[in-house]
Amino acid sequence: MKKHNDKNANTSPGEDMMKATADPRLKSVVTLIETQLSPVKEVLADFAKAMLDNTITLENRIKSFEKYSPPTMEDTPNEPQEPNELSFIPRSARVKLELNHSKALANDTEIIRLKRDLELCKKEFTEKVTKVFKTCAELELNYCKQERITTFLSYALKITKALIVFERIETPLVTQLNSIQFSVRTLITCLRKIRLTVTPPGELNFFREYLKMDEPDVREALIKNFIPPEQPFREMERNENELDFQDVISDKLINLILPITAKLQANINKENKIKKAASLLAAEFKRTEILEATQATAIAVGNTSTTNVTMEQHIKNLVEEAVKKQTSNNSTIKQKNSPGSKKPRPSLPKNTSKGNTTRPQQNENRKRKTPEPNSSTDPQKEPESSNPKKTKRNRPNEKNKQENIKHKKNNRGKNKRKNAQGPQGEKQKGKRKENGKNQRK
């Protein structure tokens, strides 16, 4: 049997807590979360991450809605106010229509009127479609705000209930309200205290800048969404025990809620601004380095006078000059005898190959090399002139050569005729071969 290891069997609440606080955005509040009790730790971590995600969505909705808002213009009281033009037109509302007509009707009054009507229709369509999109963006923004308030109040109520439970262990509570009513009233007390506190510099105003909703609207949403209708919320007189207990819980809530919501968001915004400034500064430094590098390359190339010419054009000019120099060098190399200090090399004879001579020249060279025989010293040897056979063989006869060349040409023409005649031509061919041999002999 194979044993299946259950990963969740060995997990502990501490490991889940480490996963919850592993988000790098929560690094500034990790110590605060870890000092709380185990049930409150997980709620605080989830609370902080949910509000951060909702903040990103809300900012995107605000940007998309602000596109449709007209630009601010200060109109003088004496001048009539002109209708505000559309500052943003969606792509779906942009219509490209033109009235096609012949050139002959370009100046016709009816055609001009139709063009004007078409432009009015396009403008009316664009305005109506833009208003529809703007209304949709406004609804999305309001819904996102409501979701933000609902998320905030649901997590705040969970933390309030947990604090009440742990506080009642040490401090007794005497009240006629149930747990949900007492928790809602305690949270209302906490919101009122936050509204009365002064926002320190560098932080966000909790209601106006963070929750994007005033304190009375938040209180109304709390009562509407979290108190059941069968138990309506009524103003009741509270005893001293309830007042003291709610004061203690509300102070603890302020010390927990503000650091993981408004203060955390302010720190993240500050870090994002620093990163943006650093990236802009790095881009500026890089741009200056690139400019210095281009100037250095221009100086290295040797053309520092081109102040009004771009680097790209300068490089093109250099390439063109290099190509011209190369073509001029190739043209000079192709010449046979180039001018210079060295003497031109004599050309070889046309009829002979390099390093070879004709047969008559070879014979003459042999004659020069071989010494003439001396009759007194060597009587057996005879001079070459006394042997007529050897002289005939060594010395070619120019007349015989010319005759042989003519004979070959004549034989070529006759061979063509013989091939056309058939077997008779073959007999004559044999006879002519014999005659040619006899002539050579």
Image (cartoon, rainbow, N blue to C red):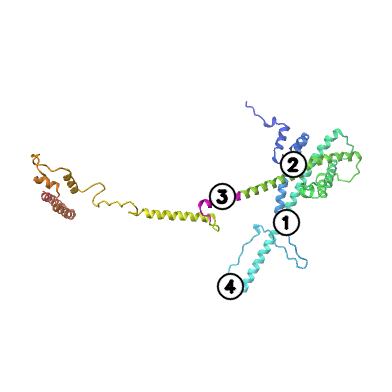
- Residue bearing the label numbered 4: 105
Mark 1 Cα within 10 Å, few/some/many (few <14, many 20+)?
Answer: some
**Would you say 317 lies left or right of 112 here?**
left
- Residue 293's label in the rendered image is 3
Q: What element carries label 2?
A: helix
**Would you say 32 lies left or right of 376 here?**
right
- Amino acid type of disc 3? Ala
- Residue 104's label in the rendered image is none
Q: What stretch is highlighted in magenta?
A: 286-304
Quadrant of the rendered image containing residue 245 = top right
Tag 1 and tag 3, C-beta contact below 8 Å: no
Q: Earlier in the sequence, mark 2 or mark 4?
A: 2
- Residue bearing the label numbered 2: 48
- Amino acid type of disc 1? Thr
In the rendered structure, does residue 291 fall within the stretch colored magenta? yes
Vertical placement of 18 versus 325: above or below? above
Vertical placement of 36 versus 408: above or below? above
- Amino acid type of disc 2? Ala
